[in-house]
Amino acid sequence: MPVSVLFVCLGNICRSPMAEAVFQQMVDDAGLSEQIRVDSAGTGSWHTGEAPHRGTQRVLREHNIAYDGRARQVAVADFDTFDYLIAMDRSNLRNITDQIEAHGGTDAHVGLLLDFASGADVDEVPDPYYDGRFEYVYQLVTDAAEGLLAHIREQHNL
């Protein structure tokens, strides 16, 4: 059964789909697409069914990364399905940990994406929805995704 990773932000239109797309590209490039499954979701439902924000789409296009996902909200089933629940910031981490506690727990690794970053100057991925800094978010996500992939490869002998 593949190792599964769920990236989580607020609306699932900016940060988490970017992380999903970047990480999926790294997984594919490493030849691990059969061993690692990747998805993303938001803690809020406002954008369910929508394509990513145009800023996220632009940055992914500029870096030649394909993505055609649609926003969805985190579901209780995700706590039993995914091995890694990776939040973009503390607020969303708190949202999912509160839901996990109400659900009765999870065996998944739950944490922040930037815990896996090597050169980040911040510890949370800022929301570019408000400030338009999509390229900066891309750089943060890329750094952390490399660290996360190395961690998963080491932990799961991939």
Image: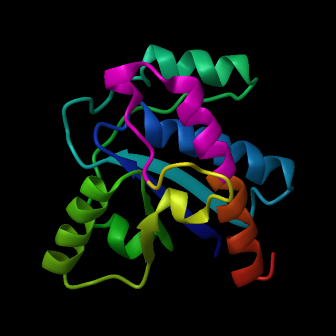
Vertical position of residue 56 compared to residue 89: above or below = above
Q: Residue at x 46, y 56 (%)?
A: 123
Coordinates of residue 21 in the picture (x, y in percent) = 61, 39
Quarter of the image where one finds residue 152: bottom right
Q: Residue furthest front?
A: 121
**Residue at x 42% of width, y 20% of height:** 53
Magenta range: 124-143
User: Is 133 above or below relative to 24?
Assistant: above
Q: Quadrant of the N terminus?
A: bottom right
Q: Residue 121: x percent and y percent?
A: 56, 48
In the rendered structure, does residue 142 fall within the stretch colored magenta? yes
Left/right of residue 48 with respect to residue 20 in the rendered view: left
Q: Is residue 49 left or right of residue 112?
A: left
Horizontal side of residue 93 vs 19, given as left or right? left
Q: Residue furthest left?
A: 102
Using the rendered view, name the quadrant where residue 13 is placed. top left
Q: Residue at x 48, y 23 (%)?
A: 133
Query: Please, which colouring scheme is shown?
Result: rainbow
Residue 142 location (% of width, % of height): 67, 44
Question: Is residue 130 highlighted in magenta?
Answer: yes
From the top left corner, tell me how far across and down residue 149 is, in percent: 71, 63
Give the quarter of the image for residue 85: bottom left
Q: Is residue 72 left or right of residue 134?
A: left
Tell me the quarter of the image containing the C terminus.
Answer: bottom right
Camera-side residue of 36 and 91? 91
For the stretch drawn in magenta, the main secondary structure is helix
| 120, 42: nearer the viewer | 120
Mark count: 0
Q: Residue at x 19, y 68 (%)?
A: 99
